[in-house]
Amino acid sequence: MKFLCVKVGDKYSTETVNKLFNNLNENYSGEIDLYCLTDNQHGFISNITPLPIQDEWKKLQWHKTTFFQNRYNGFDNGEEVIVCDIDIEIIKNIDDLVEYNFETFVGSHRWWHTSDGGKLSGSLYKFRIGELSKVYDEFNPEWQEHWVKNKLVEPPVNGEQNYVEMMVGSSLELFPFQWFTKWTTDEERNNRILNDFGKLTGELLKIENEWHEDLKVIHYAGFGK
């Protein structure tokens, strides 16, 4: 399976991407090809293929929209790929996630409370090359600023998942919500996440240092590495 990620700027190091490959490899029984779109191609282990920035005007995670273009990087149209953030941790086998059947697009479920009401989390997407090329073709600088300018998301650079959700529209499918969670550096936010999970399931997301048995992917938002 081809996994695609983005590392731009200096908030995260190339070692973060190297750890991501090892983390994926430890929790998936198939073959992993990890590609990283980056502005610094040095320091990656040999298992990772660095890719050059195409659109210099895009900011940070907005570069993920590049992966939706027709025949991206010479990949065959129709080929399944997974796009993931580099600040995730896989804590359980993801064979069923990687092999998950879908029609057009499936992504991680943003089940915790959000002010913008979005359902899609940017942690992980699965789709086929070329089938949603409009996400790339119709993207422009105005969309990049839209969600922050209208105070729908927190500044300075956010809204990428909102744009993707809007463009995917009725084709949006979501992985089982209990496979994913967000975790932050803010104790109050984390308590809200714990409460939201409890309301949804009647169960505990975390007991001391042990996560719920169904959880597979943790998005560590805002930590930096």
Image (cartoon, grey):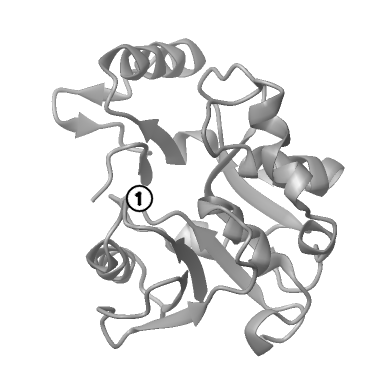
The single residue placed furthest to the front in the displayed view is: 57
**Where does residue 6 sit, x and y in percent of width and height?**
47, 63
The single residue placed furthest to the left in the displayed view is: 208
Task: Find disc 1 in the rendering and name its residue.
Answer: 87
**Where does residue 59 sit, x and y in percent of width and height?**
56, 53
Q: Residue at x 62, y 57 (%)?
A: 58
Q: Residues within 10 Å of mark 1 (few under 14, many from 20)?
A: some
Label total for image? 1
Q: Is residue 20 visible?
A: yes
Q: Quadrant of residue 95?
A: bottom left
Q: Quadrant of residue 34?
A: bottom left
Q: Is residue 103 above or below residue 202?
A: below
- Report whether 24 appears left or right of 134: left
Q: Residue at x 61, y 48 (%)?
A: 107
Q: Quadrant of residue 127?
A: bottom right
User: 51 or 114, which is in the foreground?
Assistant: 51
- Report whether 217 appears left or right of 74: left
User: 146 or 205, which is in the foreground?
Assistant: 146
User: 149 or 35, which is in the foreground?
Assistant: 149
Q: Is residue 103 visible?
A: no
**Where does residue 189 sit, x and y in percent of width and height?**
36, 16
Q: Is residue 158 above or below residue 18?
A: above
Kind of residue at disc 1: Asp
Q: Is residue 207 above or below residue 76?
A: above
Q: Residue at x 79, y 40 (%)?
A: 166
Q: Residue at x 45, y 41 (%)?
A: 179
Q: Say which element carries label 1.
A: loop
